[in-house]
Image (cartoon, grey):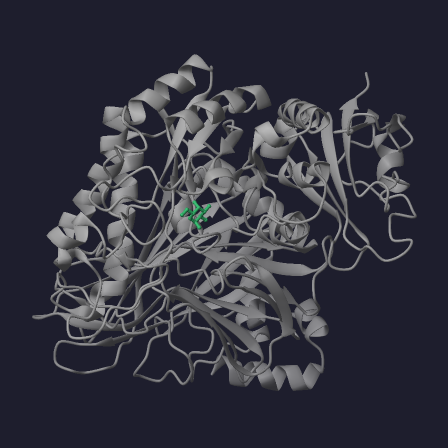
Amino acid sequence: MLRFSLMKILSYFKGIGLLLFLCPLAVKAQGTFIPVETKDDALVLHVTGEGDLNTVYFGKKLSDPKEYQITPQLYHEDETDMRNSAYTTAGTRNLLEPAIAVTHADGNKSLALKYAGQSTEKINADVSLIHIRLEDPAYHTEVTLHYQVYYTDNVIEQWSTIVHHEKRSIRLDKYASANLYLQAKSYWLRHYHGDWAKEMRPEEEKLTHGIKTLDSKLGTRADLFGPPSFMVSLNKPATEDEGEVLLGNLEWSGNYRIDFEIDPSNGLRLLAGINNYASDYSLKPGEEFETPKLVYTLSQHGKGEASRNLQDWARKYKIVDGEGPRLTLLNNWESTYFDFNEDKLSQLLKDTQKLGADLFLLDDGWFGNKYPRNDDHAGLGDWQVNKAKLPDGIAFLVKEAEKNDIKFGIWVEPEMVNPKSELYEKHPDWVVKQPQRPEYYMRNQLVLDLSNPKVQEFVFNTINGLFTQNPNLAYIKWDCNSVIYNAYSAYEKDQANFYVDYVKGLYKVMGRIRAKYPKVPMMLCSGGGGRVDYGALQYFTEFWPSDDTEPLERIFIQWEYSYFYPALTSANHVTNWGKEPIKYRVDVAMMGKLGFDIVVSKLSPDELSFCQDAIKNYKAYSGAIWHGEQYRLQSPWDNDAASILYVDTTKSQAIIFNYLINNRYGAGTHLPIKLKGLDPNKHYAIKEINLYPGTKSGIKEGVYSGDFLMTVGINPEVHEGRTSVVIGMDEAK
Ligand code: GLA
């Protein structure tokens, strides 16, 4: 009705502006408005006269919240269908992609959700949590939408809980975490694809009408072909500093599904959640189903600002010890693979100290006796120290590390099993496989059934045992190298629940470990970036972006990850991949959490001294890299050289990394690069750091004002003879 009369008025005045000017109050919609507001943005929900909950606005915050009441008409809120429903149901009058679809106990497939109340919890001065309750008047099914608002960071986490009181179980055929609605002329989606050693390859495209779906069906290490991270620019592709853009990540480490549907009125319906593929979840009466969180941030000033919002939020609220320090380390994977013994490791422990790193990380190959882990065909699952390689156990290595004044960490892959293992012999029913079909392997291994509480206990005990036997164990690298083939659980009564219960079981174990060991650093690894999302990262301090440590490739991989994750979470190891000199490799790894995986004893004296100095420089500027703000100055995608700046929160120290990407004749930086994020009124002393022994600075060192550096810039003088250049900046008082 309202819409009908509005259209008449609109045609009379032939202009919305004029209409608003003349009679803003006259066009206000009926019902209740629920603004979900951050510092700069507002997501406004509207409860219609019929009790439907719709999204009527999502964008820059208005100074007068009363004016949100005008938006339903301007955005064509149409009560005949549900295109802007805040949580679209299936089976009644919805004609588009649903957020939720259920099969009731009586077989009926319809769901209608009407507004039933709301409440707000103040979590702290900056964070609040809004709950909006919806109920089906015909069936005893309830959904609560949750919006956790991080005001200053302009970040929202959104999820839903579903509960019913029917006589028997119902089936959740689809159960999204969030159902957003955006309004613009056009939408540009940036998303990522990949494979082993090829993670985070971006594609950016204009969305057209219909549905574009990003999804995974890999079960575990579900991000191998693509992570649940995305960007949507409104009206035009956003750049680093301009344009309206939404960045999001589904906090879920299993199968996910994110639908982008442009509806008939050109609104963008964004539905994100667990993938319902083979997962029509059976929910018992009274049992609450909680969907994972979708975290998102909206920026009016480009991708750079949006990424800083997410990075800041992650450090403050999500990752473990986000505001704490990180350990530099030496890892032995690429220097020894499975071939080591106490003598070799004792030497590596000494090398760790010589290098100046904080910790030695013992990788794969330290376990299994009946089936020793001498390659990747055997032993996985048998977490007893291999007596032939390490007769004196892990305790000996921890002590040796202490003697060398360094810490000790260890690799585990506790969710997996080799068929050639005692674990498999003892507990074949703990293994995910189809009983009547041949086994199929990725890297010669199978996945343990974490939906089974006994398996959860086993995995917890594996990690807990390592800590109780070695109280000084200082670091865990938690790997996950296989997807799920032949999904079948001998434990689950209902196979449709398996994929979801696997991840919930995994989180239960990770949560227990974290509760018992709240501070110990742990790296989330999955043969590279097969599992990088905020669902798992809430239990970890860092992740392994890719097994591809070739530094040129890494610049691109780290660049793209950085839009979603802060630098201190990105475990970057210097290895022997690629042809670039050690300086280039170290400079690239420093742009995150620095580690090494090289044979230190084979370094020349100059190389060693360069690495030792680089670690010192890294520590000196770690305040900016770990906890500061990241500004991408020049993209590797369309420049000869990439340039990235980190500035600390007081804007008194900064570091700039510059890398030559192109080796065509004459490629390099020919003009100054304008810096960002500095204080224009401060002065900064600029010097080139990480100089290779025997080389001199090639930049115009000196003291410059922030104003000059941000207006004119500085040339890092990157070219064929200087392929990577690191610049340190300190406030000159
Ligand atoms: C995975 C990891 C590597 C290494 C090996 C060990 O591939 O990504 O870093 O730990 O497993 O098997």
139 sits left or right of 372 in the view: left
Camera-side residue: 376 or 595? 376
Percent across and percent down for residue 298 are 58, 55
Q: Residue at x 61, y 51 (%)?
A: 306
217 sits left or right of 224 in the view: left
View extreme (left): residue:
167
Up the image or down, 569 lies above or below 217; here it is: above
Camera-side residue: 8 or 240? 240
Q: Does residue 95 show up?
A: yes
Percent across and percent down for residue 129 are 39, 47
Q: Write down the quadrant of residue 80 in the picture.
A: bottom left
216 sits left or right of 725 in the view: left
430 sits left or right of 152 in the view: left
The number of discs equals 0
Q: Write down the quadrant of residue 321 in the picture.
A: top left
Camera-side residue: 478 or 293? 478
Q: Does residue 140 show up?
A: no
Percent across and percent down for residue 482 are 36, 58
Q: Write down the quadrant of residue 575 in the picture.
A: top right
Camera-side residue: 320 or 524? 524
Q: Residue at x 60, y 81 (%)?
A: 208
Percent across and percent down for residue 660 are 79, 48
Q: Residue at x 70, y 60 (%)?
A: 243
Q: Quadrant of the C terminus?
A: top right
